[in-house]
Image (cartoon, grey):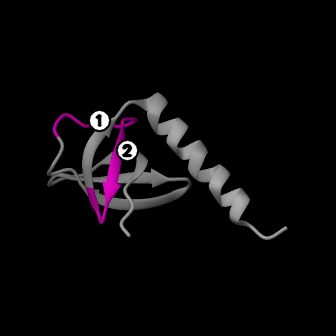
Amino acid sequence: MCLAIPARVAEILDGDQAVVDLGGVRKDVSLALVDGVQVGDYVIVHVGYALSKLDPEEALRTLALFAEMGEQASPA
């Protein structure tokens, strides 16, 4: 199963690269597939590539759902 997740762009680097923030974890990703990305935008990330920009409200809703699923999966 593959999973693409929303991440906030923290820094734009040279050569179509960026640093994204995934809940406090920073990761380098490629922006080669998405145009017009700026710091603060949310992108959908899959295997090191930003696939598309995402509306900030939708990104936050999705991240909240992931957090809720994580809480439910944790042992009591």
Check disc 2 and report the residue beneath it.
Answer: 9
Q: Nearer the viewer, residue 76 or 7?
A: 76
Residue drawn at (19%, 34%), measured in percent from left and top? 36
Looking at the rendered structure, the secondary structure element under dot 1 is loop
Q: Is residue 58 above or below residue 14?
A: above
Q: Amino acid at mark 1?
A: Gln
x then y, percent, for residue 64: 60, 43
x then y, percent, for residue 20: 39, 52
Give the side of residue 64 with respect to residue 39, left or right: right
Check disc 1 and report the residue beneath it.
Answer: 38
Q: Nearer the viewer, residue 43 or 37?
A: 43
Q: Residues within 10 Å of mark 2 (few under 14, many from 20)?
A: many
Q: Is residue 21 magenta?
A: no
Give the side of residue 58 with respect to residue 36, left or right: right
Q: Quadrant of residue 40?
A: top left
| Magenta span of residues | 35-49
Residue drawn at (18%, 43%), measured in percent from left and top? 34
- Gap in angstroms between the C-alphas marked 1 and 2: 7 Å
Q: Is residue 42 magenta?
A: yes
Residue drawn at (14%, 51%), measured in percent from left and top? 32
Q: Is residue 63 above or below residue 75?
A: above
Q: Do residues under tags 1 and 2 come within 8 Å of each other at their CB atoms? A: yes
**Is the magenta region chiefly helix, strand or loop?**
loop
The C terminus lies in quadrant = bottom right
